[in-house]
Amino acid sequence: MTTDTLCQARSRTITYGVIGCGMMGQEHLRNIALLPGTAIGPIFEPDAGMRARAACLAPGARFVNSVEELLADEDLDCLLIASPNFRHVEQLQAIAARRPLPVLVEKPLFTHASDIAAVDAFAASYPAPVWVAMEYRYMPPVARMLQMAEAATGGIRMLTIREHRFPFLKKVGDWNRFNRFTGGTFVEKCCHFFDLMRLAIGSDPVRIMAMGGQALNHLDEAHGDEVPDIFDHGYVAVEFASGVRAMLELCMFAEGARFQEEITAIGPKGKIEALVPGPTRFWPRELGAPPVAQVVVSPRHPKGPQVHEIPVDPTLLDAGDHNGSTFYQHLRFLELVRGQRDAPEVTVGDGKWAVRMGLAAQQSMTQRRMVELQDVPA
């Protein structure tokens, strides 16, 4: 490839095909619209209400009636899968059978242990790159913490992630109210955090002990003759092969917390924390301006903690509920599509580990025992 040809490849408009335009799909559309040199091509979204909202966000898009029709569009450069969790594997398989293209697929990569063989078969034969969307890696305060963690701690020995937040929002068909569609709360919601644990610690988990349940959320709802069965709180302790230990604390009936996520890493030199506000649109305006994300470094023999405010561009805050991370993730994915990056930062293997950890946590909670990761299908 000549230099001129390479420059053209890296500057031409990249056209996305989009599968799924519910709440998260619409966040992706708002953020893609902020990226120069991008366009939305065909969209497959079966729900009429979601199609109408997506049409306002991507006025040049063409709506199609199937994944197959979407893949027939000759102008496609890459694909985004933002459909309900339980559709991801079948849609990846459909893409592989018809037209392999670079894919950004939302978390979780899959929902049940029975999906693993299909995921492995897909990954072994798919010729194009697949990037699993793990937005929390790209939140500016979390990214800054990850950059500073080694120097601040002298090597992480303990890691704690606490999320206190609002309940699951309503989604099309209420699919997110049932374990059989989500994989369970500690797969659906917490695969982000298990991914962060592996990334920050640089090791793989060996065992998990967890407890949790459904205390408050959605118990007053009825969907046909069913009541939602998703957990709304829990604790998960994880031991890694390196000997480092981590813990997750989740509460999904803690609306109004000043910081939605508090991530703490501790080592022989000191402690570092990332304090992450929740979605700006949920902040009570009567409390004044919403909080600004922070990274706090506390040396073991401190003169005092060093507080670093990490402001996020208001345009990015308005474009989604993840502190600008969706935008920064797309920047990197576009580098991959344009040939400026050799491989995805978040691989199918990373996505698989995150789900396996969530499945182990759910199993530990329901069976009331410690679960060895070697016993969770790999």
Image: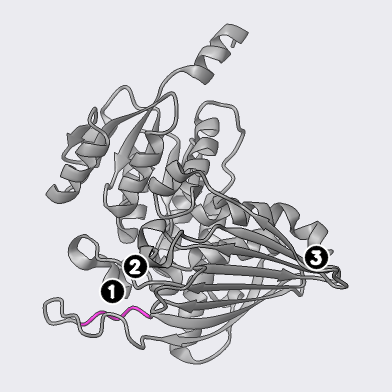
Magenta segment boundaries in residue numbering: 227-231
- Residues at marks 2 and 1 touching, judged by CB atoms closer than 8 Å: yes
Residue 18: x and y in percent read 31, 39
Q: Residue at x 66, y 60 (%)?
A: 295
Q: Amino acid at mark 1?
A: Phe
Main secondary structure found in the magenta portion: loop
**SS state under label 2:** helix
Q: Amino acid at mark 2?
A: Thr
Q: Amino acid at mark 3?
A: Thr
Say above or below: 259 vs 249: above
Q: Which residue is mark 1?
A: 178
Say above or below: 78 vs 349: above
Q: Residue at x 54, y 33 (%)?
A: 336
Residue 350: x and y in percent read 56, 56
Q: Residue at x 54, y 71 (%)?
A: 357
Mark yes or no: residue 134 visible.
no
Mark yes or no: residue 220 visible.
yes
> In which quadrant of the rendered view does residue 177 lie?
bottom left
**SS state under label 3:** helix
**Which mark identifies residue 279?**
none
Q: Which residue is mark 2?
A: 182
Q: Is residue 32 magenta?
A: no
Left or right: residue 165 versus residue 60 is right
Instruction: State the CA–CA distance, disc 2 to disc 1.
Output: 6 Å
- Judged by depth in the image, the label closer to the viewer, 2 or 3, is 3
Pick whichever of labels 2 and 3 is earlier in the sequence: 3
Q: Which residue is mark 3?
A: 153
Say above or below: 86 vs 19: below
